[in-house]
Amino acid sequence: MIRCSLGTAKVLGLKKVKVDVLPTTAYLMVGERCRFNCAFCAQARESGARADLLSRVSWPDYSKEVLLKGLHTSNTNNALQRICFQVVQDKEALAETKSLVKTVQSVTQLPICVSAGPRSIEEVKELLNLGVDHVSIALDAATPEIYARSKDGSWEERLNLLSESAEMFPGRMATHLIVGLGEREEDMIHCLQTLYDRGVTVALFAFTPVRGTRMEGISQPEISHYRRIQVAHDLIRNQLGRCEEFTFKQGRLMSYGTSVLELEGKRGGIPFQTSGCTGCNRPYYNEIPGEELYNYPRSLTQGEIERAWTQVREGLMDIVENGDHSH
């Protein structure tokens, strides 16, 4: 059995559910109950969360045959732009993923990315040699200290593997960063700059509390805080600005070195849309339907664009006027 996100099940014709926005990537999860113990993850070793959860998204399971049939059908309908394997770090999952990649390639020509935990450049190379478009190794935390508090293993080792892999396989490596684990804005933005300088694509997430995890009692980041990071990410990713040009006060962002009004005119709603691999929109991964979206899985309306930039401006003004305060 293989799990897929609820939205993916809808796109593949496997489940009838009402959704506001359909995913443009088919998200498939391989493995269950991770050997790692990340404090925020429903699949963590000691998590008491439901086994069918990853972030707030539920992942029903289906037989391989049923999923392949759905992928073949959706392929003819041009409903999807990409397939993404979310690999839970158990003993067999990575080997199982390699087999599944080959099987999926027999029914669709869509680009495939694998979000996994390869432990060496050799394992990265094995995945890329299968024809995988991107390999994503989740860093999640912006600093070694935050990593040590919320994850297992070594931040430095993971960053080194990402960096060496990106140098060896240009344009093929990606990672995740989660805003709201306790880092300062300056730390997150410096981490973003480091990763892009090394050729790593970043998917930005807002921390999302999940019942049954060690961080279930922590709040999501303030929306204005997340918006400021999104704009910094957009500028760095598109080489429109660098963190050295930004101004910080006690770890908080004060200025991008360019007027926010000018940035709004040039960038519109782009900074606030889901980031990561092309065609990945992750609907409601960080959000509850009906509440404000951290990452928009679609183009923003004019009203949403104006609101998002107002949140950016309000946050910057608050820092200038009142100095630092906690999130």
Image (cartoon, rainbow, N blue to C red):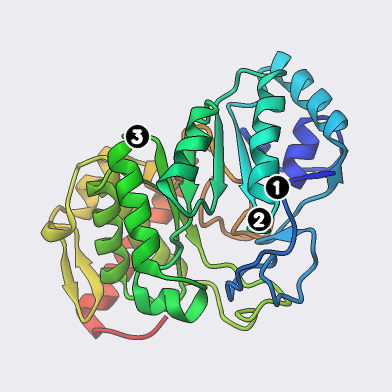
* Mark positioned earlier in the residue sequence (2 or 1): 1
From this viewpoint, is residue 303 visible?
Answer: no
* Mark positioned earlier in the residue sequence (2 or 3): 2
**Pointer 1 and pointer 3: residues touching (CB < 8 Å)?**
no
Query: Which SS class for mark 1?
Result: strand
Residue 29: image tag? 1
Q: Position of residue 114 (x, y in %)?
A: 56, 41
Query: Looking at the image, which residue is at 75% across and 25% down?
Result: 71
* Mark positioned earlier in the residue sequence (1 or 3): 1
In this rendering, the answer to whether 258 lies above or below 81 is below
Tag count? 3
In this rendering, the answer to whether 327 lies above or below 4 is below
Residue type, label 3:
Gly
Q: Residue furthest front?
A: 122
Which mark's residue is nearer the viewer, 2 or 1? 2
Query: Which SS class for mark 3?
Result: loop
Rendering quarter of residue 12: top right
Q: CA distance from mark 2 to mark 1?
A: 7 Å
Q: Position of residue 52 (x, y in %)?
A: 79, 58
Quadrant holding the N terminus = top right
Specify few, some or many for label 3: CA neighbours under 10 Å numbering under 14, 14-19, or 20 or more. Answer: some
Q: Position of residue 318 (x, y in %)?
A: 29, 76
Residue 88: image tag? 2
